[in-house]
Each structure stands twice: as C-alpha cells, then as structure tokens.
Image: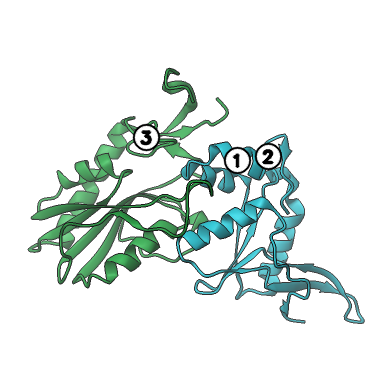
Amino acid sequence: MNPAEPLLPAVGRVVFTAAQIHSRVQELGAQISRDHAGQELVVIGILKGTLFFLADLLRCLTIPAIVDFMAISRFGPSSETGGAARLVKDLDLSLHQRQVLVVEDIVDTGFTLSYLLRTLNTRRPASLKVCVLLNRPRRRMIDLTLDYVGFEAPDEFVVGYGLQVEERFRQLPYIAVYNPAT
Amino acid sequence: MGPLSNPNRRSDFAHPIEAEFARLLDFYRIPWEYEPTTFPLAADEAGNLLQAFTPDFFLPLQELYVELTTRRQDLITDKNRKIRTLKQQYPRVNIKLLNRRDMTSLLLKYGMTGESGQLIGSPNNPYESG
C-alpha cells in the first residue's frame, strides 16, 4: 500500500461506531469497577492494539488502578520470524499477589492470549482476569475464559480503534471492515 | 469401525499453507501432529472402507482436530459434508474448519499479505489445498 493513498478506500462497512464503542467501554469500566470494589487493579495493556481501548477503559474505572504494558514478538513471514514467540516488552511491575486485568484488542484463535496468560500465571498474581474488546469465538482453538467482552466480532477482518493492517488504520475512531481488494 | 491411525501418514506437508500453520503453532509452542488419524465415514456390508476423512492437524493438548482449506466457500461442499458426517458419527471428536476467509484473515493479521498469493492463491484461482 502506498503511504500516499487515501485512508478510506480500503475501509468498508462500519461495524461499531465511535458512539457504540464509547458506550460499551463505559459499561465495561463500570462492571470491572464493581467486580473489583475495594481492590487495587493492575491493568496490563498488550501493545499495540489496545492503545485506545486501554486509555478509554482506564478513564472509566472508578477503583484504584495502575498500568503496565507487555508486547510479544509477532509471527510473520519465515524470512523475518525465527523460532518462537518471546516478550519484546516485559512488565515493569511485579504481579505477585496482585489483582490483575489483562486487556487485549481481539481474540480469535486464542494463540496469543494463551501464550500471554501462561507467561503471566508464572508471576503468581492473586487473580488474573481478561478483558477483550472483540471476541471471535468461531475461530477459537484454545479454550480461554474471557471475563469481560466488548463485542462479538464479525466474521470479517476489521480495522480501527487500535486494530491495524500493516500498522495502518489504528487511528480510526470506529471499527470497520477492511477490504483488501481495494 | 472407529478412528484409525493414518496408514498413509506423511512426513512432509501436502500444501504450503499447512507448513505455515505448523510454523504458527510452533511459534506459540502449541504441540501438534500432522494427519495422525483417519476417521472411517462409510463402509460396505463386507466392512470395506468406502469413505474416510483425515483432518490435517491434531492439537493434543486441546484435543482438537483442525482442517484447513483455501478453496472458495462454494467449492467446499464435499468437505463440509464430510465434516458434518464426522461430527454425527463421532460426536465426541472436536474438529474445526479454517476456511479461505479464515486463512486470509490470519495472513492479514500477521502482516503476510505479500505471501497470500503464494499460500492461498487468488479468489478466482485458489491454491488447491484440500
């Protein structure tokens, strides 16, 4: 894709508007705050897809929260990806005996999230819950418990609100179908 | 007749997309086996096997069989029918079909748009993976 190309031709039907996302994130924030009343929550954002979701969700929490980030190496072409997944950005905080919430953008096969949860469970948190913006259970291959789900994702590739193709479209305030043919 | 250990088990992959899927599983350290089991689906009165189905992958920790296809939706009727039959005859077997759209989405997700033509072909000329 040429960087000079306009953004929108490849962006199709809007699946979730900015207003719908805003409303749902508020609901999630309220639910998470109720469930963790009286606790301090460690909120872990998985880079980079949770960029906007995490920022918005945090501002909807009414309980004490501290934030940290994680990133794992990305699977890609064999010429660029060697070996197995690894952390490219680890946490700065200890999770030992803390209430932890992992925030992820989208879960479909479950490969990435299961890898992250395996890693985080070794840090012995008091509790470890998961909040995802989009869930696409039809493609799930690893059974996972998702404690908080924003929306069920359509069976189409979507971009926006942090979700990307080749690092593009993250900045869209809504979530839309990506049309690769355009 | 129950599931059989695949008598024709291969040591290599039948299609490039299967090799990529195996590489993806290895990346996330998910154990897998390639075409380990053949499920008899139909036999004649003498017990001779008339129809069988061998899923591409088995994930032992998830007890899940995975079948990949890069054919268009309208060209996988036979495969869908076999999977339906398998689910009826072996209701405790978990099997997941990843279709062309799923494979395209995975390639997009992992920034492999440049490889999609080689791995799954174009919509009008799909790479013939199962």
Instruction: Determine the CA span between mark 3 and mark 2.
Output: 27 Å
Instruction: Determine the CA span between mark 1 and mark 2.
Output: 7 Å
Q: Which residue is mark 3?
A: A160
Nearest to the eye among marks 3 and 2: give it: 2
Q: Which chain is cyan?
A: B
Camera-side residue: A17 or B111? B111
Q: Which chain is green?
A: A
Q: Which residue is mark 1?
A: B116
Residue A152 point in image, percent of width and height: 41, 49
Residue B87 vertical position relative to residue A33 in the rendered view, above or below = below
Q: Secondary structure at mark 2?
A: strand
Earlier sequence position, callout 1 versus callout 2: 1
For badge 1, the amino acid type reads: Ser
Residue at 63% across / 73% down in the picture? B91
For badge 2, the amino acid type reads: Gly
Camera-side residue: B124 or A35? B124
Q: Secondary structure at mark 3?
A: loop
Q: Which residue is mark 2?
A: B121
- Residue A162: image quadrant is top left
Q: Residues within 10 Å of mark 3 (few under 14, many from 20)?
A: many
